[in-house]
Image (tube, rainbow, N blue to C red):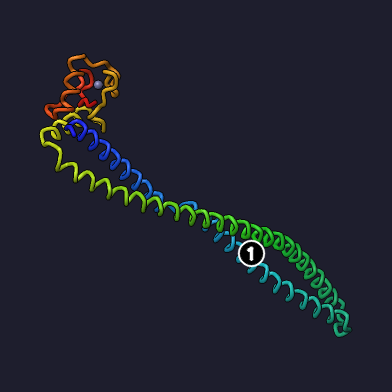
Amino acid sequence: MSWGSQLLDLQEVENGLRDSIGAYKQIQKQLSETTPERQAREGYEQAIAAEREARARQQNLNLEWQGMIQKIDEEEKRLYSGEVKNPKELSNLQLEVEMLKKQREKLEEQALALIEEVDEWTSRAAATKAAYEKVEQDQRDRQISLEEQEKKLKRQISIRRAQREKMLVTIDPTALEQYRYVQRLKNDTHAVSTLREGVCTSCHIEVSAAKRDTVERVNSETTKLVTCGNCGRILVN
Ligand SMILES: [Zn+2]
C-alpha cells in the first residue's frame, strides 16, 4: 500500500474517531439533561401542595361553621326559653342572633367558593400528575436509548483508537509529518484528496497531466507524495 493511500485510510479513521467522540460528548450532555422531567415534577408538587393547603382551609372553615351553628342554636334557645325577660336584653339577644346568622351566611359563601377551589386544585393535581408520569416515562425511554447509543459509541471509539494506533506505527514518519502539515495548513480534517479523472475531488480543479502521472507512479512505487497545485492537499488515486 502506498503512503498516500495509507494516509487516506488514516484520515478516514481519524475523522471517524473525531465524529464518534463528538457524538459521544453530545450523548453525555443529553444524558445529564433532566429539565422537562424536573419542571413536570415541580408543577405536580405545586398542585398537590396547593390542594392540600386549600383542603386545610376548608377544614378550618368547617370547624368555624360548626361552632357558629352551635352558638346560634344556644342563643336561640336562650331567646325562646322565656328565661330572658328584660325587653332590652331580649332585643339585644335577638340582634346578636341575627348578626351570628349573617356571619354564618358569609361562612357558607366562603365554603362554597372553597369547594370550587379545592375541586380545581384536585383536577389540576391529577392533570399535572399524568403529565409528569408521561414525561417520566418518555425520559426513561430516552435514557435507555441514549445509554445504548453511548455504549455503541464507546465501542466505536476504542476500535477506531486501536486502528489509529496501528496505522500510526506503519506510516512513514515523513509522510505523516507532511499530512499533519497540510492538515494545519488547510485547518480542516481533509488533508488527503482523491483524484478522479484528473480532477482533485476536494477543490474540483483539474490537475496537470504530468502531476497525474506522478500520482499514479507514486501510488505504485511508494515514493514521494504529490500535492494538488490548487488546494495543496496530498493527492492519491
Ligand atoms: Zn485540490
Q: Quadrant of residue 160?
A: top left
Q: In the rendering, at what x and y percent does residue 218 appear?
A: 16, 25
Left or right for 62, reference 50: right
Q: In the rendering, at what x and y percent does residue 189 appear?
A: 26, 33
Q: Quadrant of residue 132?
A: bottom right
Disc 1 C-beta below 8 A from ligand 1: no
Which kind of residue does numbered mark 1 sit on? Ala
Q: Quadrant of residue 213?
A: top left
Left or right for 17, reference 53: left
Residue farthest to the top, as pictured: 209
Residue farthest to the front, as pictured: 220
Q: In the rendering, at what x and y percent does residue 204 appear?
A: 30, 19
Residue in the image at 18% along x and 29% along y: 182
Q: In the rendering, at what x and y percent does residue 152 appear?
A: 36, 51
Q: Which residue is mark 1?
A: 54
Q: Nearer the viewer, residue 236 or 109?
A: 236
Residue in the image at 67% along x and 58% along y: 120
Left or right for 141, reference 80: left
Residue in the image at 52% along x and 53% along y: 138
Quarter of the figure that contains the N terminus: top left
On screen, 117 above or below 98?
A: above
Left or right for 55, reference 229: right
